[in-house]
Amino acid sequence: MPDYKAHFKALLKNEAATDALGKCLARQLVAGLVVYLHGDLGAGKTALTRALLHSAGYVGHVKSPTYTLAEPYEIQLAGQSVTLMHFDLYRMSSPDEFLEAGFRDVFNQSTICVVEWPEKGESILPLPDLDIYLTVAGSGREVELCARSERAAVCVNGLNFAPNL
């Protein structure tokens, strides 16, 4: 995979910093983006996704799709309605479960796909545009964003994030 030279690391000292990063990411989203969220249980994957969704205009409850595998959300990007699919593959028993549900078709140029626990579907998922790694660090989190495509590089390079909250 080519290196797009877009990389970002920060310490998120608290939940407000995680929310602020979600807000900054929401401003950089583009249709068709595939985002993988990596991290242990409790690392903040769903919290970051929730902040991103609310900042992109979604006003309802955002729940982890742990049992449903996927939850669709309608958000606004540049005045256009776009579907963001939030996947949580933690409880997926095999990659075939993902295929049988027809989720592969959701990965297209008009839908944003955010995938928690992508390693559970590694053999069948499309490659990510953006990898986000979250690690618990004391009472906060360390976050690392790595662009894997040109459109993700634009997203990461366009972040205007001040983590010192």
Image: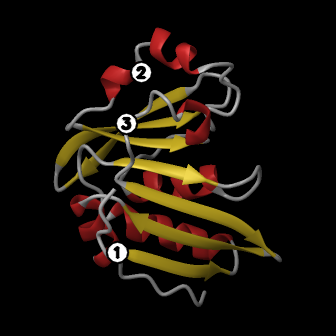
Q: Which residue occupies the extreme right position in the image?
A: 138
Residue that protrudes farthest toward the front in the picture? 1
Type of the residue with mark 3: Pro
Give the quarter of the image for residue 151: bottom left
Label number found at residue 103: 2
Badges 1 and 2: C-beta atoms under 8 Å apart?
no
Residue assigned mark 1:
6
The tag earlier along the polypeptide, 1 or 2, is 1
In this rendering, the label closer to the viewer, 1 or 2: 1
Find residue 85 and report its horizontal and vertical position in percent.
Answer: 42, 35
Q: Residue at x 63, y 19 (%)?
A: 94
Residue drawn 55% across and 85% down?
A: 163
Q: Amino acid at mark 1?
A: Ala
* Residue at figure coordinates x 41%, y 21% from the top left: 103
Q: Quadrant of the N terminus?
A: bottom left
Q: Is residue 43 above or below residue 118?
A: below
Q: Which residue is mark 3?
A: 126
* Percent of width and height locating residue 35: 42, 50
Image spot of residue 122 (x, y percent): 52, 35
Which badge, 3 or 1, is on the more N-terminal residue?
1
* The residue positioned farthest toward the left in the image shown: 79
Whole-angstrom CA distance, mark 3 to mark 1, is 20 Å
Between 60 and 56, the residue placed more toward the observer is: 56
The part of the image, by quadrant, that contains residue 154 is bottom left
Secondary structure beneath dot 1 equals loop
Q: Is residue 135 visible?
A: yes
Of helix, strand and loop, which one carries label 2? helix
- Residue 125, above or below 62: above
Q: Residue 124: which disc?
A: none
